[in-house]
Amino acid sequence: MPGALARLRGLVPIGVVVLVALALTFVLTERYHHRVLTLVLIWATMGLAWNIISGYAGQISFGHQAFFGVGAYVTVLLVVGVRLTPWLGLVAGAVAAVVAAVLIGFPTFRLAGIYFALATLAYPLILRIFMDFLGYQEVAIPMVRDQPALYMQFTDPRAYDLLALAALAGTLLLSHWIETSRLGYALRALKENEQAAEASGVDTFRSKMVAYMLSAAPAAVIGAIYAHAILYVVTPDAVFGLLVIVQTLVVCLVGGAGSKWGPLLGAAIMVPMSETLDATIGDRLPGIQGVVYGAALVLVMLFAPEGLYWWVRGLLPARRTVPTPAGVAVAAGPAGTATAALELATDVAGRAPLARGAALIDVRSVSKAFVGVHALEDVSFAVQAGEILGVIGPNGAGKTTLFNVLNGFLAPDQGEVRYRDERITGLRPNAICRRGVGRTFQVVRSFPHLTVLENVMVGAFVREAATDRARQRARAALAAVGLDARAEVVPGSLTTFDLRLMEVARCLATAPELILLDEPLAGLSRDGVEAMMALVRRVRDAGVTVVIIEHTMYAVVQLVDRLVVLDHGRRIGEGVPGEVVRDPAVIEAYLGKRWLRHVENLKA
Amino acid sequence: MALGELVQYVVTGLLVGGVYALMSIGLALIFGVMRVVNFAQGDFMMLGMYLTYFLAVGYGVDPLLGALVAIPPFFVLGLVVHRVLLVRVTGGGDPQRLMDAQLILTLGLSLIITNATTMILTPMPRGIRAAYATQAFAVGPVLLNQARSYAFLMALLLAGAVYAFLTRTDLGKALRAAADEPEAAGYQGIDVRAMHGLAFGVGIALVAAAGGLLATYHPIEPTVAVNFIVLMFVAVVLGGLGSIPGAFAGGLLIGLVQSLTLLVLPFQLQNVGVFIAFLLVLYFRPQGLFGQRLRAV
Amino acid sequence: MKAAGTHPRRGIQALAIALAVLIAAPTLLAPAVARAEDLKITLVAPLSGRWARQGQLKKMGAEMAIAEINGAGGIKALAGGKIVLREADAGDSVEKAVSAAQRALSREKISVGIGSWLSSFTLGVTEVAERLQVPWFTLSYADNITERGFKYTFQSSPVSSLQAEQALDLILDLARRNNQQIKKAALVGDNTAAIVFFFKPLREKLLKAKGIEIVVDEVWTPPLADATAIIQKLRSTQPDIVFYGATNFPDSIQVLQKVKEFGLKTPIMGVGAWLVTPEYVKTVGKELLDNVMSVTAAHPLKGQEDLVKRFTQRTGEPFMTQDPLVTYAHVWIIKEVAELAKSTDPKALRDAVTKLDLRSGPAASALTPGRIRFDERGRRVGATPIIVQWQGGEPFTVVPAELATRKPVWHGGK
């Protein structure tokens, strides 16, 4: 479905949510009920903000309350200190939170998983202590009797409902925009497989930082609204404390993380439940409400551990994806169409042409050691533009390590790698990918929850900023490898061969000049090997240089122009296949000295 | 500053850290083997404190002994909690989604335990009046509070016992195997689920024992966990998730940093020192002091 | 997705049962219906969570007063209408406290409110009361509670800064009568608001004005890891008095234990009623507390022995402290206000408070110096603090002498 229309259709559910909230705002009569509605909207917004970094990007944060608190304190202190209206103070708070996100993100994104989550916890705890230290234990918002609306103080509780709703709508729109944008694809990719994302050109660090900044701003805004609508007095514990992140986690994880509907559902259910418990049994039998609420949390997690939204979706009949007729036609079409698609996929404007035979990659004296193992020792060779270069050698020779050095996953201890005569050692993998080096992996690294097309689009975003154009480029790449019939399925349902094709397509979508293929033929049938080899040739004919690691000898010697042989981390041979296979050093490496003597005896 | 004073700061920090250390080992074991973030860890400690208190007040059992007596019943409690609740949200499946589910489930458990205790036992704080809580050993100019010293020694002993169990016994090795490579362990005939239950049981027993030791000088109330839960997690992460000696070292380090921070920062910022040290360690050694090196991206 | 995918029905059943219980619960636990002429008041205080004990003590005091008032025929000006208490649990966060107040005041017509012990809770709760124009009584000490220009908030305790000034005079007087000189003082406490408000004037002007040197000034953020460093400083500087403000119970216990451990003999003057509660003697025993003093807003005075006996018999508490006493007084104040206003209308009641001048009765007997009037800010005119001292495992009012139930013991000597 064309992108623009799909985007607009996605706005409809948001509109429905807004209308429902508006209806409730004007239907509810009791002040206390309005407070509950405001709380639902506030925590849903906070949940959505958290979801941007922790749901979409998969970087679970236990410290989001830092931004919530920054927004609250900055706004309120500006009111108390310089009588600045919170409508402007909000902006200041959001800016402060974004700055905080940068300061926090820079050192902390080096960590991952639970380490990241717990590290983020430290920041709001530090801020909490500082607020106490600075004398801001209790900052009461001064009641303004003359023009209270100017200071975000309303007598009509519906005004707070609308205020929180505005923040919620804004954050929903932000989430929606992210989901369908280049950033959204980048985040999903790095969440599913960070290494594959890097190799496909996603600047994972920058994406995480942008997501973090985008998640901090709404958190600060809603923190400021919370202070004015709910608290009236800001204490460090109330806005930087654990209760804030606990409430956020409950709302998001009970609702279902990774989707913008999860936090909405979670807030809509858990906040009224908590308030109802407080209002009914809590006042009569204090403490019982905690027991019941805790039991509810336990029950939901036992029966719907992925969250209520995903659980409900799982109950609905599965959506079927039908392969588009147009896709089938292309695959069945003549090879010419596929070639055209290949050219489209690999087309990139503004790239200086390189003379055939010039050194595209220059590996100079690269060494890499791990604890006790010299994986690579003084390896030097050059890859010529337009060739298919094979890298062979016995198991453990260092071939994959070499690839990891070439595309930036590892930094060599000594030596350097030059691409188009530019030093690329030390660059991050995504930067190397952008310069034109693509990579596939020994074990295919797919993004399991994305469709095949979306997997390839991740690569296409290297060259396209707009989602529609990225989709076009991705489709072309899929057509080039002949996989367009399977565009809408998830990788889990693909055969090994098709998975490899998908990875090649993702590579091609980045419009590479050179592709590093790591054992693409392993485990394939005879037919599969033939088809893959034909594809590799087509790729090279379209102008892409290929470096291929392979063990399947009969195929390699037919396919490659030249060979480089590694053994125990050293380069022991280089040249055309005919020479290399007769090279005694090579034979010895593969078969051992005894066999070499046998061969020599045979010759004699 | 006189050397004696400095030594006092160090000693105070280590004694305080000893009990943090024991609290944290239980958490480290649970996380190391099961990858579960147990929000309710502090509440089990609280229950251990109450048990020790009732043993002391009702039967005259010294809390140092009471802490040991608490181990078997809490081990069983841990097994039961694992079998009934946690088994549904651990072991196999998407680790991200599971961690989410564990967080909320253990949070719910924590709410239930704290609130039920408040309702049943009332919020009135209680205390064991051990004479040695207000006495100190004098080693030169340095004073070592007796209760804290005994607690420290017991913590060391218990930690040592756990470490020996993990490294020297077959069961302990099976536990570690189940932690490192659950699939391979399964092929070797190790019942991974039973190992999880064992780890959780031991983890809960340890933190209950820590509570008993804490009760020698700390008042007991249903919400006591709130003072320690963050420090527990910090200690475990500092030490390296899944490393028992790491968690112990982490706990000691926190106590030490808390004490030494007073020499450089205003008193009010004491815990800021801890969190900054925490962040610095993670920055330079993301895997913690003793943890396994994470794969670089 | 194993669990959910394979047992959706069980999941639905479990959730349905849970929902049914939640929906049924309110009807099972519905509050008793009150009579039309009754005066409905609310108590918003922590009844669950970390400060549950404090809220429960307040509730005990309120219930006792209500029982007495209703038992003696209720409010005559309302044709014998009874006082009905609607308590709301403030929980353990400002959000919950404000929600509780909002809930209590919008569920039904509430005429007056009391609460909420923690000054941050009180600040939030009174904002609600001010907006809904319902008069509110609090025992919180913090100055800022009545510095907001509110018309509906009434603070019966002397404010912290004033307490500091008056208490210092009382202390110096006490020391003089015991032939003790106070030349060096220590300030030891946490950074909670009430303590901050008390220490600030002491630190900035009051002590200097009396020629007293501050030799130790240690403020911490709760929770306190270890008190050794503080006690060592006290030991090495030997102050003549320690002003002490550790409102977090475990922190406070630690400090007292260390004082004993290090053998410190300095007189300790607490700042607040938290130091003179039964949990102290139950947790650390009477030896550690002997002769420890505290400045508080209220404690049973001479002439209230009967009241105290009624309270301890009714509740089983070993003695009566500020929280139930002041809440008891608040309810009696409310009764007199209702008599004056002859109405249950909150606005009329508020106006009556401004005209109130009680010089006798249970409320006036409980709050020094025995007269209940409120100024335009809502502060009780002439409110003075008292000094309470632990003697033999029970706290007694010792200063001022005319209201004391025991003679003070100056715990001096190095």
Image: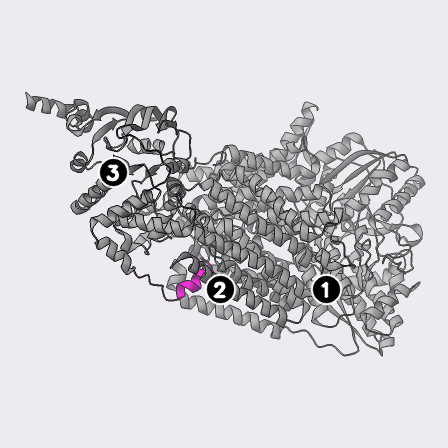
Mark 2 belongs to which amino acid?
Answer: Pro
Residue that mark 3 sits on: A540
Q: CA distance from mark 2 to mark 3?
A: 47 Å
Q: Is residue A315 magenta?
A: yes
Residue that mark 1 sits on: A155
Residue that mark 2 sits on: A13
Query: Does residue A88 appear to the left or right of C265 in the view shown?
Result: left
Instruction: Work out whether mark 1 precedes mark 3 in sequence or the reverse, and give the earlier one.
Output: 1
Q: CA distance from mark 1 to mark 2?
A: 31 Å
CA neighbours of label 1 inside 10 A, class few (<14), some (14 to 19), many (20+): few
Q: Which residues are magenta?
A: A304-323
The vertical placement of A596 against A43, above or below, is above
Does the CB distance between marks 1 and 3 fall below 8 Å?
A: no
Q: Quadrant of residue C38?
A: bottom right
Q: CA distance from mark 1 to mark 3?
A: 72 Å
Instruction: Work out whether mark 2 precedes mark 3 in sequence or the reverse, and give the earlier one.
Output: 2
Q: Quadrant of the N terminus of chain A?
A: bottom left
- Mark 3 secondary-structure assignment: helix
CA neighbours of label 2 inside 10 A, class few (<14), some (14 to 19), many (20+): few
Query: Does residue A109 appear to the left or right of B56 in the view shown?
Result: left
- At a point 58% along the width and 49% down the height, the residue shown is A217
- Mark 1 secondary-structure assignment: loop
Mark 1 belongs to which amino acid?
Answer: Thr
Q: Is residue C19 magenta?
A: no
Instruction: Work out whether mark 1 precedes mark 2 in sequence or the reverse, and give the earlier one.
Output: 2
